[in-house]
């Protein structure tokens, strides 16, 4: 919702415009008011101002100076000057100062609403889809190396399956100099020793130096895509330029040359685990796991090692589709934190199916890994949110701590599903209670301060929510807007005072926040179909 601030040192002008903009329906906005420029700046330091509707001639600080200060606080704010002068040159000077538009104080309400609507449309245009997409493209260009890395690691560490066509299209978008079809060679590299005295911030620069050396050494034979990995490691993804296969001797011999060049020019020693035989892209995740196993075990622990891996090498264990990865467990945990039931169910089913397809034995390595990964995730969640006591009354938490409490894998998975459902149900119930409490507190404050400041800004201070969120939350819960509820509450109170008190009608209107008696009369008649005096004559015993 857009926020409009009215500023004028003449109260009658401020109150008239405030009441008019509050009641018009053409431009939904929150309206604030101030009697001077310093007061307006105090408000602007607390909340965002979208449209400034201000007099030009005011004591202490005039409207031109206020507009400059407001632009400093809120650069996107549009200023509309109110003026009692029709002199064209005077209006021109205000527009040159950066004003969006101007209106004469004698203009009809309709004209003021039109100018405010025009300013809000201009703000919306500033945030148009074209501008946002342009900014997104600029940011994407800066982020492109990270996007390339994330996508390639998704292919290799999480076993992302894609068609050659979709992979090629994504490669083109990200500037990856490889083909999405055909086969690919994988080589995992590791920096064994950095130059003496190197700063941590310089390591990425040295890693890319290694990548440049690799590209130069393989130039003319292989296309090379260099990818950094955690733990001083890196990856080379390579394809032949003409599709002709290369031999193991050429690959290993070139990697030896890269080791020598890195040692000589960068003072860096490296080890490599190479996939000497190319693999299909959809098999690259399994190849990556075998190479990682090679790098982390046996000869891979030495310095400047050069290891080879073939499709017939069974030294590394086979993965069950690469499903139980840190990323997948992270996605599952994120869905639980977001209370996204559908996303959690989908990811949970994916992990469970991958394990069950490999035999479903509760004591198998895959099943044990999944059980204790889920156990750790749920324990962290329960502890973080203080839910252990609450959940103990709903599920048997001893089944969370020990695999011995489950007879089969299916039983264990059923338990975890049930625990997740209990947590989702508990979160939904708590959210409903919290929402109802917010509405109750807002309604109570409105009733207790019926003639005071009931602006959206003031109400948000009571419940510590943003104005737009409070508006949506209130309407979602009550099927009524906050503005409508406040107006109805004031009208109900007005009826009570008209029928049961001796107060003057203008006093009643003033007490209930209506600064203009004609406005109070007009609004009451529109809502009740009779004037306040007619209502008092019909239902009251007091004289107005």
Image (tube, rainbow, N blue to C red):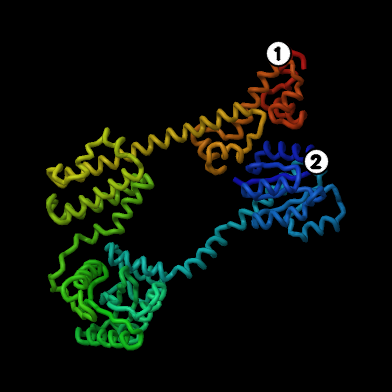
Residue drawn at x 24%, y 57% as measured from the top left: 324
Q: Residue 540: give its label.
A: 1
Question: Viewed as shown, does residue 65 lie left or right of 170?
Answer: right
Q: Secondary structure at mark 1?
A: loop
Whether residue 169 is visible, yes or no, is: no
Q: Which of the 4 image quarters holds residue 180?
A: bottom left
Q: Whole-Å distance between the Cαs marked 2 and 1?
A: 36 Å
Q: Which residue is mark 2?
A: 10
Question: In front here: 423 or 472?
Answer: 423
Question: Viewed as shown, does residue 315 lie left or right of 65?
Answer: left
| Residue at the limit of the structure toward the top, as seen here | 541
Q: Residue 301: give its label.
A: none
What percent of the width, then of the height, locates residue 260?
Answer: 28, 87
The image quadrant where one finds the N terminus is top right
Whether residue 133 is visible, yes or no, is: yes
Is 152 drawn above or below residue 127 in the view shown?
Answer: below
Residue drawn at x 80%, y 44% as measured from the top left: 107
What percent of the width, then of the height, locates residue 490?
Answer: 65, 27
């Amino acid at each position: 919702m857009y926020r409009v601030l009215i500023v004028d040192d003449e109260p009658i002008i401020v109150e008239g415009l405030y009441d008019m903009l509050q009641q018009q329906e053409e431009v939904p906005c929150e309206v604030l008011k101030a009697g001077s420029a310093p007061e307006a700046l105090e408000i602007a330091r607390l909340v965002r101002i979208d449209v400034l509707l201000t007099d030009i001639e005011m004591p202490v600080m005039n409207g031109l100076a206020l507009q400059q200060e407001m632009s400093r606080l809120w650069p996107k704010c549009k200023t509309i000057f109110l003026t009692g002068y029709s002199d064209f040159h005077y209006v021109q000077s205000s527009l040159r100062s950066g004003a969006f538009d101007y209106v004469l104080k004698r203009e009809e309400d309709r004209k003021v609403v039109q100018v405010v609507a025009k300013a809000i449309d201009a703000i919306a245009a500033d945030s148009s889809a074209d501008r946002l997409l342009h900014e997104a493209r600029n940011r994407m260009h800066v982020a492109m190396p990270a996007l390339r890395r994330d996508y390639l690691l998704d292919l290799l560490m999480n076993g992302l399956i894609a068609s050659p066509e979709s992979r090629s299209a994504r490669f083109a978008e990200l500037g990856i100099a490889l083909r999405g079809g055909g086969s690919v060679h994988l080589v995992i590299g590791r920096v064994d020793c950095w130059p003496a005295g190197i700063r941590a911030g310089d390591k990425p620069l040295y890693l890319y130096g290694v990548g440049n050396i690799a590209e130069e050494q393989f130039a003319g034979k292989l296309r090379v895509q260099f990818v950094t990995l955690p733990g001083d490691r890196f990856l080379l993804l390579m394809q032949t330029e003409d599709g002709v296969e290369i031999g193991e001797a050429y690959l290993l011999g070139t990697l030896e040359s890269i080791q020598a060049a890195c040692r000589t020019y960068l003072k860096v020693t490296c080890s490599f685990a190479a996939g000497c035989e190319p693999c299909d892209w959809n098999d690259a995740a399994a190849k990556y796991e075998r190479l990682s196993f090679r790098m982390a075990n046996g000869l891979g622990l030495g310095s400047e090692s050069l290891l080879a891996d073939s499709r017939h090498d069974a030294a590394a264990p086979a993965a069950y589709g690469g499903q139980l990865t840190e990323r997948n467990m992270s996605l599952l945990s994120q869905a639980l934190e977001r209370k996204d039931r559908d996303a959690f169910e989908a990811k949970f089913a994916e992990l469970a199916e991958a394990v069950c397809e490999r035999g479903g034995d509760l004591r198998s390595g895959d099943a044990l890994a999944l059980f204790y990964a889920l156990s750790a995730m749920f324990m962290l969640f329960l502890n973080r949110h203080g839910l252990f006591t609450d959940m103990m009354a709903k599920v048997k938490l001893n089944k969370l701590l020990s695999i011995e409490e489950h007879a089969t894998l299916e039983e264990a998975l059923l338990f975890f599903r049930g625990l997740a459902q209990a947590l989702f149900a508990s979160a939904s119930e708590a959210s409903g209670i919290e929402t109802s409490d917010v509405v109750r507190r807002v309604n109570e404050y409105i009733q207790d301060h019926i003639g005071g400041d009931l602006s959206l800004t003031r109400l948000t201070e009571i419940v510590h929510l943003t104005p737009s969120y409070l508006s949506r939350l209130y309407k979602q819960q009550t099927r009524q807007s906050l503005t409508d509820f406040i107006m109805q509450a004031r009208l109900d109170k007005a009826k009570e005072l008209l029928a049961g008190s001796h107060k003057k009608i203008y006093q009643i209107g003033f007490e209930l926040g209506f600064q203009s008696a004609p406005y109070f009369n007009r609004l009451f008649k529109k809502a009740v179909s009779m004037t306040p005096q007619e209502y008092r004559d019909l239902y009251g015993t007091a004289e107005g």
